[in-house]
Image (tube, rainbow, N blue to C red):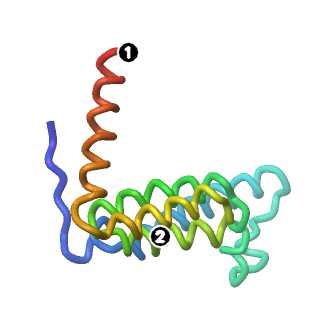
């Protein structure tokens, strides 16, 4: 058992920082792969265009979708929309547009919290059954 602590300026309390951290982590992986394959670090080659390397990166978009759920549950649907908009900028896909609508609809009441609780209950049942 553990307890998670956060501080006011911490990463988990700032959705913009979460998105930036996810982008930097993915960019580091993309740059490492490029160095191994081609012997060139794309960030060194053109630092200003570094984040353009993530456009079309499905792994980064998938990570942003997960962050969008976290942000929506923790901060509200509008914050989830902000994160999912970044995912749509990276990889425009229909399922991300549906998630965006879902977060906007979730602003009313505790809709997202109830969905999150139901998803956790199913996840716990699946783990204990496996």
**Mark 1 and 2 residues: CB-CB less than 8 Å, in contact?**
no
Q: For mark 2, does the 10 Å Cα neighbourhood hold few (<14), some (14 to 19), or many (20 or more) residues?
A: many
Name the residue rendered at 15%, 42% in the picture. 2
Task: State the residue position of label 2.
Answer: 83
Q: Which mark is residue 116?
A: none
Q: How many marks?
A: 2
Position of residue 102 in the picture relative to residue 54 (left or right): left
Q: For mark 1, does the 10 Å Cα neighbourhood hold few (<14), some (14 to 19), or many (20 or more) residues?
A: few
Name the residue rendered at 54%, 67% in the picture. 24
Position of residue 124 in the picture relative to residue 105 (left or right): left
The image shows residue 48, relative to residue 122, as above or below, that is below
Secondary structure under the numbered disc 1 in the rendered image: loop
Quadrant location of the C terminus? Answer: top left
Q: Quadrant of residue 93?
A: bottom right
Across and down, in percent, residue 50 comes to 69, 75
Residue at mark 1 to residue at mark 2: CA–CA distance: 33 Å
Q: Residue lying at the far bottom in this picture: please name it.
A: 48
Q: Quadrant of residue 77?
A: bottom left
Q: Which residue is nearer to you in this view: 50 or 98?
A: 98
Q: Residue lying at the far right in this picture: please name it.
A: 38
User: Which comes before the other along the chain, label 1 or label 2?
Assistant: 2
Name the residue rendered at 60%, 55% in the picture. 95
Task: State the residue position of label 1.
Answer: 130
Name the residue rendered at 38%, 66% in the picture. 105
Across and down, in percent, residue 100 comes to 50, 66
The image shows residue 126, relative to residue 32, as above or below, that is above
């Amino acid at each position: 058992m553990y307890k998670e602590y956060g501080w006011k300026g911490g990463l988990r309390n700032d959705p913009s920082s979460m998105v930036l951290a996810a982008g930097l982590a993915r960019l580091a992986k993309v740059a490492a792969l490029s160095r191994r394959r081609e012997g060139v670090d794309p960030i060194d080659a053109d630092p200003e265009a570094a984040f353009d390397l993530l456009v079309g990166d499905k792994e980064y978009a998938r990570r942003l979708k997960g962050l969008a759920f976290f942000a929506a549950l923790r901060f509200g649907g509008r914050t989830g929309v902000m994160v999912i908009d970044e995912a749509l900028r990276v990889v425009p896909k229909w399922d991300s547009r549906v998630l965006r609508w879902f977060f906007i609809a979730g602003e009313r009441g505790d809709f997202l919290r109830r969905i999150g609780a139901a998803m956790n209950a199913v996840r716990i049942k699946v783990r204990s059954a496996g």
